[in-house]
Image: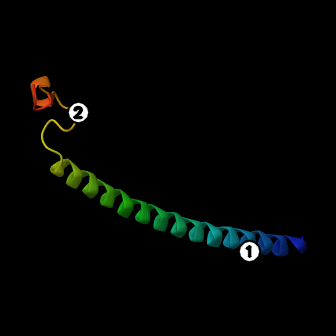
Amino acid sequence: MSGAPAALQERVTELEIKASYTEDLLEQLNMTIYRQQQQIDLLVNEVRELRRQVPEGGPGGPRNLRDELPPHY
C-alpha cells in the first residue's frame, strides 16, 4: 500500500487545482454581474429621464382630429 499515499496526494493536488479554477471563475462571474448591474442601473435612469421628457399621454396618446386640420379649413 505504498502507492496509496502518493495517489491520495495526487487527488488532493487535483482538487486544489480545481478549487483554484473555481475561485477564478467565481471572481470573473462576480465582476460580470457587477458590470451588468451598473449597465442596468444606467439604462433604468435613462428610461426614467426619457419618460420625464415625454408629455403625459405621449406621442401615441389620444388626439383630436381638429388639431390636425390644415390652417385653411
Badge 1 marks a residue whose secondary structure is helix
Residue 70: quarter of image: top left
Quarter of the picture holding the N terminus: bottom right
* Residue at position x 83%, y 70% in the image: 7
Q: Give the number of the disc on residue 60.
A: 2
Q: CA distance from mark 1 to mark 2?
A: 65 Å
Quarter-of-image position of residue 8: bottom right
In this rendering, is residue 17 above or below 57?
below
Frontmost residue, 34 versus 60: 60
Instruction: Estimate the x, y position of residue 61 in percent, counting from the top left.
Output: 18, 31
Instruction: Say which residue appears at 16% left-offset and 50% top-offset.
Output: 52
Query: Label 2's element?
Result: loop
* Amino acid identity at mark 1: Thr
Which residue occupies 73% across, 74% down? 13
Dot 2 crowding, Cα within 10 Å, few <14, some 14–19, many 20+: few
Does label 1 or label 2 sit earlier along the sequence? 1
**Between marks 1 and 2 in the image, the one whose residue lies nearer the viewer:** 2
Q: Which residue is mark 1?
A: 13
Q: Is residue 43 left or right of residue 68?
A: right
Image coordinates of residue 4 in percent, x first then y, are: 85, 70
Would residue 3 be found to the left or right of residue 60 on screen?
Answer: right
